Image (cartoon, rainbow, N blue to C red):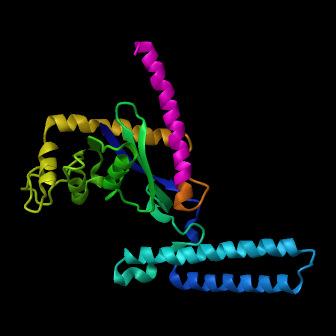
């Protein structure tokens, strides 16, 4: 009925020095392919050689490196698309984990990381939704999480509690549509002009956004929103305490698998605690 969502940055299994620009990536890929060809020729020339296994292992390692470099060039196109034309030549991708991105971390530094999104039911602190992205910001992450709940449970959350980083007008409109009907609780940004009330509807606001502005001016909405920090930030802190600072695997799907293990462990622990509470109260 009421779900709080928050994101946290988790260090990737890649170093900052592994991020290279397009010319370097293309050169490294050409060298890797050349190495593979050379190793194959050596194996074909002396198939009965005693060190065949070593050469075969080196060939597999070279092929793996070539795949990662090809993936890095593929991911580089995505990075370049998000940059201004004048800044495209500075786009870089990691040769170690091509899907990782340099993000601002909680300590204020910039490191290769993934953005882990967790949605938590406020009453029980059971995690109900999870996602991993390589986008450093939280804008645009709320609507996909609501869709995930619809697919998993056959019902969208009645209420979504998110911080200002999630408050994208398009997302608020999308999740507030009649077929979804999720009420959003998120802080309204201060108006750029001091004489404008941020809770007053703008001409370009959709009906859902106008309702959100008015809603967040009420005391009831402010009290409901307080549950976000007590839920989402608490769950994130628990994950940190259990070691979710950095992953040792590479690639978004593998990182998601690690995060799912953390979520599973968290929900089992919460289930144990909730059952104990119910026994005490006789429910």
Is 205 a magenta residue?
no
| Front in this rendered view, residue 22 or 257 | 257
Q: Does residue 149 lie above or below 80 as drawn? A: above
Q: What is the x, y in percent for residue 8?
A: 43, 50
Chain part drawn in magenta: 256-283
Which residue sits at x=36%, y=46%? Answer: 149
Query: In this image, 234 relative to 217: left or right?
Result: right
Is residue 80 or residue 67 the one in the foreground?
Answer: 67
Q: Quadrant of the N terminus?
A: top left
**Could one spot residue 241 in this view of the protein?**
no
Main SS type for the magenta part? helix
Quadrant of the snapshot with the C terminus:
top left
Q: Quadrant of residue 3?
A: top left
Residue 114: image x %, image y %?
Answer: 48, 58
Q: Residue 153 sits in which quadrant?
A: top left
Left or right of 150, for residue 114: right
Q: How far from the left and from the top, in percent, is residue 118?
A: 42, 46
Magenta stretch encompasses residue 268:
yes
Residue 123 seen by the camera: yes
- The residue depicted at 42 percent of the width and 35 percent of the height is 126
Viewer-closest of 212 and 24: 212
């Amino acid at each position: 009925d009421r779900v709080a969502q928050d994101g946290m940055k988790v260090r990737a299994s890649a170093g900052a020095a592994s991020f290279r620009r397009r010319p370097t990536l293309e050169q490294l890929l050409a060298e890797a392919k050349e190495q593979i060809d050379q190793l194959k020729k050596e194996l074909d020339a002396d198939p009965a050689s005693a060190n065949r296994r070593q050469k075969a292992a080196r060939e597999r390692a070279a092929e793996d490196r070539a795949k990662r470099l090809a993936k890095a060039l593929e991911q580089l196109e995505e990075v370049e698309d998000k940059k201004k034309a004048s800044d495209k030549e500075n786009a870089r991708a990691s040769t170690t984990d091509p899907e990782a991105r340099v993000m601002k971390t909680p300590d204020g530094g910039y490191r290769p990381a993934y953005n882990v999104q967790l949605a938590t039911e406020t009453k029980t602190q059971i995690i109900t939704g999870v996602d991993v992205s390589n986008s450093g910001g939280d804008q645009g992450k709320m609507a996909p999480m609501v869709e995930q709940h619809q697919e998993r449970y056959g019902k969208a959350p009645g209420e979504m509690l998110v911080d200002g980083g999630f408050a994208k007008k398009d997302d608020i409109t999308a999740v507030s549509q009649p077929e979804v009907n999720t009420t959003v609780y998120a802080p309204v940004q201060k108006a750029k002009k001091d004489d404008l009330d941020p809770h007053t509807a703008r001409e370009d606001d959709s009906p859902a956004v106008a309702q959100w502005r008015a809603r967040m001016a009420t005391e009831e909405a402010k009290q409901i929103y307080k549950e976000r920090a007590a839920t989402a930030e608490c769950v994130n802190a628990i994950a940190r305490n259990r070691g979710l600072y950095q992953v040792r695997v590479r690639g978004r799907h593998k990182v998601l698998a690690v995060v799912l293990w953390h979520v599973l462990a968290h929900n089992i622990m919460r289930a144990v605690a909730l059952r104990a509470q119910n026994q005490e109260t006789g429910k």
